[in-house]
Amino acid sequence: MPAIIGSYQSAVAATISQTCERYAVPYLASDNSAPSLTKRGLKFIFRPGAQDEMFSGAMFDFLDALKKKGQKVETLAIFAEDTIFGTDSATVQRKLAGERGYKVVADVKYRANAPSLTAEVQQLKAGNADVLLPSSYTTDGILLVKTMAELGYKPNAILAQDAGFSEKALYDAVGQQIVGCMTRGSFSLDLAAKRPMVGKVNEMYKARSGKDFSDLSSREFMAMIVLAEAIDRAKAADGAKIRDALAAIDIPGEQTIMPWTRVKFDETGQNTFANPVLLQWTGEKFVTIYPETAAVAEANYPMAKG
């Protein structure tokens, strides 16, 4: 096996990448966002997409922009699951909140796949933050939103760290309860208006899968494209040669389906040019609201209260 792509959960990626390192097999972290994954001195891990420090930076830039427009954005609630994904995300958001002058009025760490979130949502409700920042996978996200509805809690905005809040399954289950929910992301189908290739590739994907690219599937697709480019350059199905080709790769952003500047890895294996976007759920689909270079709509803030 010359290379591996994976693996959705950062906690799983932490184990896989260590094993890959031992056997000199490149691991492309297609949709893992925990910052610590590329800070362990490993030589065979590569992440084409952004990590949570980059994502959270964009999220706080957006909050700062809202404040400049006169919106009330003063207090935050951090809600994070207890695996490496949620722990890393909460750490970054806590740090940024302090640096940017936001008050964290609730900081809730919960057990992933918990059977109940009643006590945790009561803490969130008591804090009554302007913006809720959840880092949750799909099942937990659905339970969170349903519990919020049961307890009559709805902040001015939900700005999620992707994961479950980018998944169609969550919105199929609770979507009308969180119209106006925002999430960071890597992919914007709206980009097709400015970069026609995005629409063409999406049509090809949809013909095979029956659905549009999502934030996660687009990242997995790009990881495969990057790996294929590296294998072509290596001219061999050899892990060490593919690793060297990945380290040297430099793909212009306009040659991808992502809103990235380029694909070029630093010495840790992180693509530092993977520009994040922010998306808002309209009740039927996501639209890009940030940054201005990619946005097709203004953010609705506060989110719908219905």
Image (cartoon, rainbow, N blue to C red):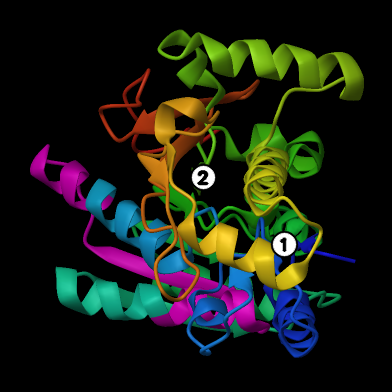
Residue 118: give x, y in percent of width and height.
71, 74
**Position above or below: 4 against 113:** above
Lower position in the chain sequence, tag 2 or tag 1:
1
Identify which amino acid the numbered label 1 is placed on.
Tyr
Residue 185 is tagged as 2
In percent of width and height, residue 18 lies at: 72, 87
Q: Do callouts 2 and 1 mark residues in contact (Cβ within 8 Å)?
A: no
Q: Splitting the image into 4 quarters, where does residue 66 fall?
A: top left
Quarter holding the N terminus is: bottom right
Q: Residues within 10 Å of mark 2 (few under 14, many from 20)?
A: many
Q: Let me know if residue 76 appears in the view.
A: yes
- Mark 1: which secondary structure? loop
Q: Residues in magenta?
A: 63-91
Residue tagged 1: 137
Identify the image quadrant of the C terminus.
Answer: top right
Which of discs 2 and 1 lies nearer the camera? The answer is: 2
Q: Residue at x 62, y 73 (%)?
A: 45
The kind of residue on which mark 2 rests is Gly
Q: Secondary structure at mark 2?
A: strand
Does 83 appear in magenta?
Answer: yes
Residue drawn 64% across the image and 43% down it: 229
Left/right placement of residue 294 relative to residue 145 reads left
